[in-house]
Amino acid sequence: MKWLRHEDRMSSLNEENAKLKKQFDLVDKDRSGYLSLGEVQSYLSCLGYPIILNEIKQLFELIDTNNDQKISFKEFVIGAKKIQSSGEQNPDPVHSFTKIFQTIDSNQNGSLSRKEVAEALIEFGYHITVDEIN
């Protein structure tokens, strides 16, 4: 019975790490395997968090434990667990989606135009034009 509980815990950890890996890859726009300060700043902006560079730098420095000016996946996992345990992150995906939607909806009319989507994609590092969205 003890073995099953251990397996369940390992399965849960693997699922959590897989989710974190997807998040990490979403932020890692240049596919370097590391997160830069700019990538973290851009990601937080898309989530609707106010861009206060000093606070982002402090968060980055807290997670970048080896001080190499980049965040590895291992550092990202440890940082995410610290944030989750401190209660600073809202794990509700609907809340996160709503924040992203509200950020992209620049005229706050409740719908996203092609232009708003293109602007958001460009801000998040994609090379795209409004014409490509049409």
Image: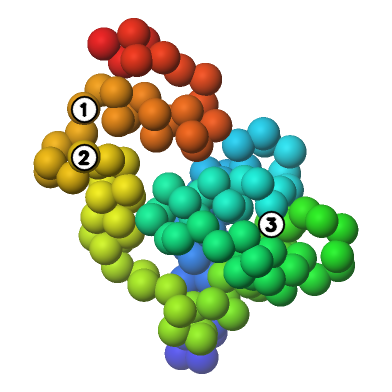
Q: Which of 21 and 50 is in front in this view?
A: 50
Per the rendering, the mark at residue 73 is 3
Label 1 environment density (alpha carbons within 10 Å; few <14, some 14–19, many ≥20):
some
Per the rendering, the mark at residue 113 is 1
Helix, strand or loop at mark 2? loop
Q: Nearer the viewer, residue 73 or 43?
A: 43
Q: Tell me, what colour scheme is on the image? A: rainbow
Q: Are marks 2 and 1 in contact (CB under 8 Å)?
A: yes
The spot of residue 28 in percent (x, y) is 62, 43
Q: Which residue is drawn at 34% across and 15% down?
A: 130
User: Mark 1: which amino acid?
Assistant: Ser
User: Mark 2: which amino acid?
Assistant: Asn
Separation of residues labelled 2 and 3 (CA atoms): 36 Å
Helix, strand or loop at mark 3? helix
Q: Left or right of 61: which side holds 13?
A: left
Label 3 environment density (alpha carbons within 10 Å; few <14, some 14–19, many ≥20):
some
Helix, strand or loop at mark 1? loop
User: Mark 3: which amino acid?
Assistant: Phe
Q: As displayed, is residue 38 above or below residue 29? A: below
Q: Which of marks 2 and 1 is in front?
A: 2
Q: Name the residue under label 2.
A: 107
Q: Are marks 2 and 3 in contact (CB under 8 Å)?
A: no
The spot of residue 104 in percent (x, y) is 31, 41
Q: Left or right of 72: which side holds 87?
A: left
